[in-house]
Amino acid sequence: MDKLIITAAICGAEVTKEQNPNVPYTVEEIVREAKSAVDAGAAIVHLHVREDDGTPTQSHVRFQECTEAILKACPNVILIPSTGGAVGMTPDERLDSTNTNPVPEMATLDCGTCNFGDDIFDNTMPTMRAFGKRMLEKGIKPEYECFEMGHLDTILTMARKGEVPGAPMQFNFVLGVPGCIPATVDNLCWLVNKIPAGSTWTATGIGRHAFTLAAPAIAMGGNVRVGFEDNLYLERGVLAKSNGELVDKVVRMAKLLGRQVATSDEAREILSLNKR
């Protein structure tokens, strides 16, 4: 079994300081949270960025600023910028996060339209083809974000047609978003059993499911994502003081389950990325 890759989704586009005062907005706060996660054991930082007032943005200028600052503090971390952005952004806005220099090693690619609480997260086939084309042209490895069962079949069909990068593929199964697939072990197993041989996968449990989904993912040989984007609490009623606290909890779970945690370079090897 490979070592466990932990991803920290440090701020997202929707959570606010009103919900947890430790949610980062400014460049300095984003660096602080990235470093807390990496120091605790995260090999990857999944990156959204904000304006100083908390407004989500996909501006490559802001991504460039945050990326450079994070890499100065955490020189070897893998960064996965979001191309999901925030609900309501245009595809061109969302793709701007891939226009940094250097080109990102990885980026997310959302695999279909779905309900997202009271909103609709719009990912049409033309949008996904455009995102796939961008990643093929720039040599960016996608992390395929699946929020529904059908998303997996959709992206596998696109890969067979050469519309998005193919094997070896990395999937992130995001379970528990209101309106999408529930966060159950049965659903996680169904998804994992359908991916191509040689693929890698990560489990993301939303809200109260963050750690109840992390445990089976660790035991099954998958990887885990936690962070303020997905869950603001260390345990019921206890707000996390940092992303590092959330990562540390996963590290302790892995130790109890007999799984070693991967460094960023070990994660690059597991994910078939080129070393920087």
Image: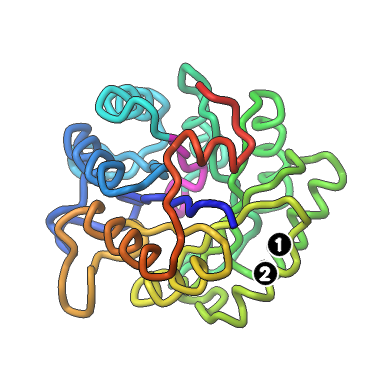
Residue 201, relative to residue 219: is it above or below? above
Residue 100, relative to residue 254: is it above or below? above
Is residue 192 something one can see in this rendering? Answer: yes
The residue to which callout 1 is attached is: 152
Q: Position of residue 161 (x, y in %)?
A: 87, 44
Residue 77, relative to residue 191: is it above or below? above
Q: Position of residue 35 (x, y in %)?
A: 24, 39
| Residue 202 horizontal side relative to residue 69, left or right | right
Q: Position of residue 142 (x, y in %)?
A: 62, 41
The amino acid at mark 1 is Leu
Q: Nearer the viewer, mark 1 or mark 2?
A: 2
Kindly indicate whether the residue at mark 2 contacts the one at mark 1 (C-beta within 8 angstroms). Answer: yes
Majority SS type along the magenta span: loop
Between 74 and 266, the one nearer to me in the picture: 266
In this picture the colour scheme is rainbow
Q: Residue furthest front?
A: 258
Between 86 and 68, the one nearer to me in the picture: 68
Res 210 quadrant in image: bottom left
Figure label count: 2
The residue to which callout 2 is attached is: 191
Q: Earlier in the sequence, mark 1 or mark 2?
A: 1
Q: Quadrant of the N terminus?
A: bottom right
The amino acid at mark 2 is Leu
Q: Position of residue 34 (x, y in %)?
A: 28, 41
Between 146 and 168, the one nearer to me in the picture: 168
- Per the rendering, the mark at residue 230 is none
- The magenta stretch is 78-88
Is residue 122 something one can see in this rendering? Answer: no
Q: Residue furthest top?
A: 101
**Residue for point 69% across, 37% down:** 130
Q: Is residue 105 magenta?
A: no
Q: In whole angstroms, how far apart are the C-alphas of marks 1 and 2?
A: 8 Å
